[in-house]
């Protein structure tokens, strides 16, 4: 009997192929959408992690508390030992110290007098050859001219910024800032290269220097604002980050306000709400899709049972019970739903995989965009990709048929001969 | 030809003061009125009468598709009005074959598969099914068209497949509501001859509804319905030339 029903199903394309395609296309779209959304979220969060707070970060309690008002006064002392401990206790995480600083860039003329001055947002990172920062900040890729600093006293400036100041490669500039203790600090640097990140905050007036130079310049030996940690898979994982933070903080009790403390990106970035919104957005998209697909498939089911009115009538007259007819409709829907959802999931995964591994370069589509985090569209496949399309596809097909198929029970056998007669 | 059995055993269908009314708006329409009939095993009987006289309504009740408003209908020992829908379906599935005016073959299935369908409902093994389907297609002279789809069959051929489908499970009773209404004279005769042959060889009881003279000629019993009442019930000798 099953074989018989299967034969009918596959021979009748409007019963199999059309709903199957509807289901597969819907499922593929939702899988793709879901992994694209995850990829876009990743890109956004990764930019935040790379440029702002890492996946986890260690800073003093006072620094953490001060938030955006934090100054170098609140920096972490004894960074070398903090780093040593972190590398020992969390060897899988890439750790790197950073210091943010503000000040003025003073560009002298040939006589040594100030030609032009401009406020600057400084970022001190480890620029040594083996530093993970080269990758984290995508420095090589972002280089607009020149080269990365390789000698003490060399810095990078935002490309636009350097042009505005009229500073050329190799030119000397002076940083005027303040030391950890609040006195004036000045230090000379040479421009080795310019960078363009595609992030407004970093491209307007930024200076990137080696942290060793800045420790000297700002008189903060063995100190840094924060130590950023990047999780192994390059992806923020809130649960893992929370676990690491809890472990670290349990051995670093709240002794004083300069005691180190580990924060996760979720809290350090202030993006906690954003994480939830992105999660909710995925759920919402899946929900809208399920509803839309259920309506479409329900309709298809209704049209199908209209079209099959005669066939079902004959089957009832010949003596198939209504339950058996209804069950066969459900079985057909289950089969179509299973195959459609499987195909849809595979297609969706294949497309997502392409976006994940190769990406879609859209830089040509928006040449003037300033907020582009990454001009390559990316997706990320996650375990949920397997079910986020599959289950709704299967369920919508199944329940669509289950609801429309109830019409079988409304059929009056007394009318069958009349219906079948004409 | 009678197939053994005692006297009461040979009664296949009996109705007693059968009444069927329909609500039409506020009024009641009496489709069948005090119909008391008996059909014996192996009969080849026809309900004849003008349109609206209640032929289909009576066949519906005998076929357990409908239930009487009052009176009783006993089909193969079962009281129709007391059967649950499931029991009625089971009785139809095992013992009653239907032939419709518009052949009603299942569209995507071959002739063979259409005939096989009632046997699948009965859960027969594939070997049994193959034997019975092949036999049935031979009875109706369509063994060579087993693989054809309904769209590839003529009206007469389709109706013969429908007959094969109705008799393949060797039912006690075959009900045919105007089986020739959509066929030309030649095909009508072929169909009737096929059914006469099955009635003779298998002993199956046939009850028709018709107002087709060509069918009436083959009947061995002619029951005339007028306004839902039995106006005449006569045995006759068929004229099958
Ligand atoms: N479901 C129904 N609801 C209302 N009236 C009905 C219904 N079924 C049949 N009738 C009425 O009952 C009467 C008998 O109908 P029936 O179909 O049995 O006639 P018939 O002899 O088969 O006619 P025909 O030769 O045209 O097929 C008719 O007046 C018909 O309108
Ligand atoms: Mg009729």
Image (cartoon, coloured by chain):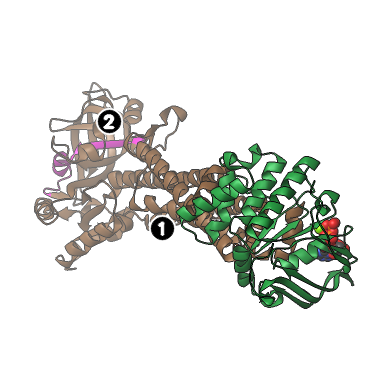
Chain colours: A brown, B green
Ligand 1 contact, mark 1 (Cβ < 8 Å): no
Which quadrant of the render holds ligand 2? Answer: bottom right
Judged from the image, the secondary structure of the residue bearing numbered disc 2 is helix
| SS under mark 1 | helix
Location of residue B4 with respect to A396 vertically, above or below? below
Q: Residue furthest toward the top?
A: A110
Residue at (41% x, 55% y) in the render: A279
- Front residue (pair A274, A416): A416
Q: CA distance from mark 2 to mark 1?
A: 31 Å
State the extent of the magenta-drawn residues as a range. Answer: A203-222
Residue beneath disc 1: A276
Q: Are marks 2 and 1 in contact (CB under 8 Å)?
A: no
Q: Is residue B113 above or below residue B232?
A: above
Q: Residue at x 82, y 57 (%)?
A: B237
Q: Does the magenta portion include A208?
A: yes
Label of residue A232 in the image? none
Please name whichever residue, B5 or B57, is drawn nearer the observer in this view of the structure. B5
Residue underneath mark 2: A141
Q: Could one spot residue A399 in this view of the protein?
A: no
State whether residue A92 is above or below residue A318.
above
The chain holding disc 1 is A
In percent of width and height, residue B34 lies at 85, 75
User: At which x and y percent is residue B73?
Assistant: 74, 74
Q: Tell whether position A27 is magenta.
A: no
């Amino acid at each position: 009997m099953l074989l018989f029903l299967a034969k009918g199903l596959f021979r009748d394309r409007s019963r199999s192929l059309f709903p199957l395609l509807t289901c597969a296309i819907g499922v593929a779209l939702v899988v793709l959408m879901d992994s694209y959304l995850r990829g876009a979220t990743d890109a956004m969060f990764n930019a935040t992690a790379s440029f702002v707070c890492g996946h986890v970060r260690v800073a003093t309690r006072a620094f953490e508390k001060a938030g955006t008002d934090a100054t170098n006064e609140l920096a972490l002392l004894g960074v070398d030992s903090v780093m040593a401990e972190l590398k020992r206790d969390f060897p899988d995480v890439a750790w790197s110290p950073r210091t943010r600083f503000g000040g003025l860039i003073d560009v002298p003329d040939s006589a040594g007098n100030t030609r032009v001055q401009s406020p600057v947002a400084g970022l001190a990172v480890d620029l040594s050859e083996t530093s993970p920062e080269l990758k984290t900040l995508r420095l090589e890729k972002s280089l607009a001219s020149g080269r990365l600093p390789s000698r003490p006293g060399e810095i990078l400036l935002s490309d636009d910024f350097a042009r505005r100041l009229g500073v050329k490669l190799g030119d000397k500039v002076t940083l005027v800032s303040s030391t950890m203790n609040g006195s004036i600090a000045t230090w000379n640097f040479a421009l080795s290269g310019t960078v363009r990140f595609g992030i407004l905050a970093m491209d307007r007036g930024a200076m990137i220097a080696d942290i060793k130079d800045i420790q000297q310049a700002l008189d903060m030996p063995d100190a840094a604002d924060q130590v950023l940690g990047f999780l192994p898979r390059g992806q923020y994982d809130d649960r893992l980050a929370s676990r690491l933070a809890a472990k670290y903080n349990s051995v670093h009790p709240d002794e004083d306000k300069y005691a180190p403390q580990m924060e996760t990106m979720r809290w350090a970035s202030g993006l906690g709400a954003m994480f939830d919104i992105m999660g909710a957005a995925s759920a919402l998209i899946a929900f809208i899709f399920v509803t839309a697909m259920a309506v479409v498939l329900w309709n298809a089911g209704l049209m199908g049972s209209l079209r099959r009115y005669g066939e079902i009538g004959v089957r009832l007259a010949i003596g198939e019970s209504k339950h058996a007819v209804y069950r066969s409709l459900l079985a057909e829907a289950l089969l179509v739903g299973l195959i459609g959802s499987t195909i849809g999931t595979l297609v969706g995964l294949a497309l997502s995989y392409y976006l994940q591994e190769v990406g879609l370069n859209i830089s040509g589509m928006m040449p003037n965009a300033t907020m582009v985090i990454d001009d390559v569209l990316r997706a990320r496949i996650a375990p949920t990709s397997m079910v986020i399309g599959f289950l709704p596809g299967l369920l919508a097909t199944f329940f669509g048929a289950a609801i429309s198929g109830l019409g079988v029970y409304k059929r009056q056998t007394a009318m069958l001969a009349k219906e079948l007669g004409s | 030809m009678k197939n053994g059995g005692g006297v009461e055993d040979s009664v296949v269908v009996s109705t007693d003061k059968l009444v069927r009314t329909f609500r039409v708006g506020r009024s009641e329409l009496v489709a069948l009125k005090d119909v008391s009939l008996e059909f014996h095993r192996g009969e080849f009987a026809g309900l004849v009468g003008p349109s609206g006289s209640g032929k289909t309504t009576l066949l519906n009740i005998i076929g357990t598709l409908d239930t009487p408003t009052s009176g009783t209908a006993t089909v193969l020992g079962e009281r129709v009005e007391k059967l649950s829908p499931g029991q009625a379906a089971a009785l139809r599935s095992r013992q009653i074959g239907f032939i419709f005016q518009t052949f009603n073959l299942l569209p995507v299935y071959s002739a063979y598969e259409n005939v096989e369908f009632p046997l699948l409902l009965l859960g027969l093994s594939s070997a049994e099914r193959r034997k019975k389907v092949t036999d049935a297609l031979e009875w109706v002279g369509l063994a060579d068209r087993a693989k054809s789809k309904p769209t590839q069959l003529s009206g007469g051929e389709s109706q013969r497949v429908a007959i094969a489908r109705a008799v393949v499970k060797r039912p006690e009773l075959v009900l045919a509501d105007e089986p020739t209404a959509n066929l030309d004279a030649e095909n009508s005769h072929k169909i009737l001859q096929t059914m006469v042959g099955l009635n003779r060889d298998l002993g199956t009881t046939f009850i028709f509804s018709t107002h087709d003279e060509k069918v009436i000629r083959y009947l061995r019993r002619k029951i005339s319905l007028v306004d839902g009442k039995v106006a005449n019930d006569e045995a006759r000798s068929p004229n099958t030339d």
